[in-house]
Image: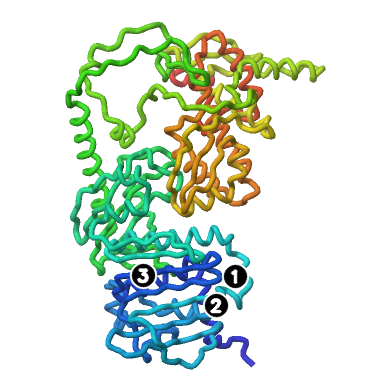
Amino acid sequence: MPSIHVMSPTLASQVAAGEVVERPASVVKELVENSLDAGAKFVRVEIRRGGVGMIKVTDDGSGMSRADAELCTKRHATSKLSSLKELFEITHLGFRGEALPSIASVSRFKLCTRQQQDLEGWEIRIDGGLEHEPRSSGVSPGTAIEVADLFYNTPARRKFLKSAETEASHVEHQIRLHALAYPQVRFAYKRDDQLVFDLPATADLRVRISALTDAATAAALIPIETTIGPGISITGFLLPLSEARRTRKGQYVFMNTRPVEDQLINRAIRDGYGGFPTGLHPALFLYMEVEPALVDVNVHPAKKEVRFRRSADVVNTIVEAIANTLQKHARQEIHAAAAPEPERTLPAHSTTAPHGEIPARSTNPGSAFPAAARPAPASSAAQPPLSSSARQSYGPVPPPTLRAIPLKQVPATQGKLDFHRQEDEETARNAHENAAPERDASAGFSYLGTLRQQFALFETPEGLVLMHPKAARERIIFERLRARREAPMPSQQLLDPVVLDLDPRDFAVIRQFAPHFDQAGMVVTPFGQNTIRIESIPALLELENARAFLLELVDRLTQSEFSRNAKRVAYETFIGEFARKSAWRERISPHRAPAILKDLLACEVPYCTPGGKPTLVNYSVPEIKRKFGLQA
C-alpha cells in the first residue's frame, strides 16, 4: 500500500486555513474584501469575544444567486479570474477562491445572500467542512456571512490566539485599514453589541482620516503633492517628526486600495525624508495607484506583500513625492515665521523657580560644563526662526523653556529627587556596610582638563580617554534608580488629566500593562473607546511630551516578546527617560569630572548611556602615533 495519498477536501481546506486564517482579524479581512469586491456601499462588521465567538460581516453589494452561493464555498472557485492573463492584471482584492472554504472548515459558517432583482435569497450552512442543504431565506439585497466558534474543531490553533482584548484590537485595526482605503464606503463596527464607530461615506480623504484619528493628528496632516511617474501615481498625507514611532504603526500604505507592507516602499519613504533618526519610522498615509500589469500581488498568502516589475520607478516616484512635499512645506513655514508679528509685552522672568520646576539657564544646552558669558553672533538676529510645526517636521532644535505643570499636593516621598544628596547618603551607607575597601577603577586615570567646555580629558597608561560628563551622569542615575526598582517611581498628579485617542492596538497594550505603568509612575485609565486618560506622570516628564513618551513605551512593550518582561521594560523605559532629563539639566563644573568618572566605572555598563550613546571614547597610544605617521 503506498504511503502517499491524496488528502480529503476537508483536511486540505483546514491545511489551507493555516495560511489564510491566522486569527479572527484574518477572517474579517477576507470577508470585508469580498464585500468591497461586490461593490458594497455599506459594510457592517460585528464581533463577539474578540472574534472567536462570532464574526458577522453584512454588506449591500451585488449579492449572489443560488448557484453562485453554492459554488463560492468550493475550493478554487472564483468569479474574478478566468485566464492566465488576468492573473497578471489583478484589479480585485481577492482572487484565489481559498478564503471561504478555508474559513468554513474551521468554524460554524452561515452565508445569507440575495440579488437585487430576486424575490428571495439563499442560506448556506457549513459546520467544520460539513455542508448542509441550501435553503431559501428572506434577507435584504446583499450578503451576510456569519462565522461562529472559530477554530472549534482545531483546538491547537485556538491555543495560539491572544486575549479577547488583543484579538479585538487587531480586528478593529483591519477594519480601519479598509475604511482608510475606501472613504467612499460607509463602515460600521460593533464589538460585543456595543457600537465602536459608524463612519459615513465621504469623498474627502482628510475627513475619513480625521474620523479615525485624534484632532491633533488630523490638524497636523501635510498633503502630499500629487506625483506622477511611469505607470504610478502618488498622493496622501505626511505627519511631522513628532508623530514618528519606533514601529511602523504610524505608516498606512495602500497600493490600488490594498493595504500593503513592502520593504522597498519602506526604504523609499525613508529616502524621501532625506534620512531619519535611527530607530524611528515616519508616520504617513501613502496612497499609490499602479498599473495592474506592473505589480504582482500573488506573492504572499495573505496578499500583504507585493512585487513591482519596475521597482526603480516606484522608488523614484515615492522619493520625489515626499521630498517635494517636505520642501514646499518648509518654505511655507519659513515664510510664515518671517512675517512681522505685533509687538508683545513679556513679563519679566523671576529668578526663583516654582516648586518642582527647574529654572531656565542661560548656558548653552549642548555644553557639559558652564561656560563664561559669550556675546551672541551678530548674524543670529537676522535669521528668521522656524515655526513650531516646522521644527517638529524637520529635525531637533534646542529645547524651549519648560512650562510649569500644575501639581496636586503629593506625599513628601514623591517630591523632587535630589540626586546629589541621595548619592552621598548611598555612598556613606555602602562604605559603612562594606568593611573591605573596593578597588578604585579610576586610579589609573589622570585628569588633564576639558575640551570646548564639553568633554573631560583623561590620560591613561594606554592613551587618551574622552568622557562626556552628562552622558556619564545619565548612566549613573539610571543604574542607581534601577537598583531601587521596588520603590515606586516619583510622580506628579495632574490637575487637568490628559485625554488621548489611540490606535486600537496601542489601547489594548496599555490596558494589558496598566499595573506596570503605575509602578513606573504613570497612572493611565480607560476613558471610552480607544481613549485613555493620563492622571499622573513621572516627575521629570513634561506634559507636552506625554503622548509621544507613552507611545514610545507602548512600542517597546510591543517589541518585548514575553509579558513577564513587561514590568522590567516599562520601569526601565521610564527611568531611562528620567535619567536622561535629569542628567542633561545638571550644571556640571569641571572639578567634578574625576568623581563622575569614578562613579561611572563602578556601573555595571559604564561605556554607554541607556539609549546606547557612548560615555567614554578611547584613543590608544599606537593609534595616536599612526595619526602622526610614527611607528607604533
Colour scheme of the rendered structure: rainbow
For marks 1 and 2 on the same chain, the one whose residue lies earlier in the sequence? 2
Tag 2: amino acid: Val
For marks 2 and 3 on the same chain, the one whose residue lies earlier in the sequence? 3
Q: Position of residue 184 (x, y in %)?
A: 27, 64
**Residue at horizontal 24%, vertical 47%?**
223
**Residue at horizontal 28%, vertical 77%?**
86
Q: Regarding mark 2 in the picture, which secondary structure is present there? A: loop
The image shows residue 584, relative to residue 316, as above or below, that is: above
Q: Are marks 1 and 2 in contact (CB under 8 Å)?
A: yes
Q: Name the disc covering residue 208, or none.
A: none
Tag 3: amino acid: Val
For the residues labelled 1 and 3, the Cα–Cα distance comes to 28 Å
> Is 153 positioned to the left or the right of 453 in the image?
right
**Residue at horizontal 34%, vertical 45%?**
215
Closest to the observer: 238 or 198? 198
For the residues labelled 2 and 3, the Cα–Cα distance comes to 24 Å
Q: Regarding mark 3 in the picture, which secondary structure is present there? A: strand
For marks 1 and 3 on the same chain, the one whose residue lies earlier in the sequence? 3
Residue pointed to by mark 3:
43
Residue 281 in view: yes
Q: Quadrant of residue 156?
A: bottom right
Q: Position of residue 122 (x, y in %)?
A: 40, 88
Residue pointed to by mark 2:
106
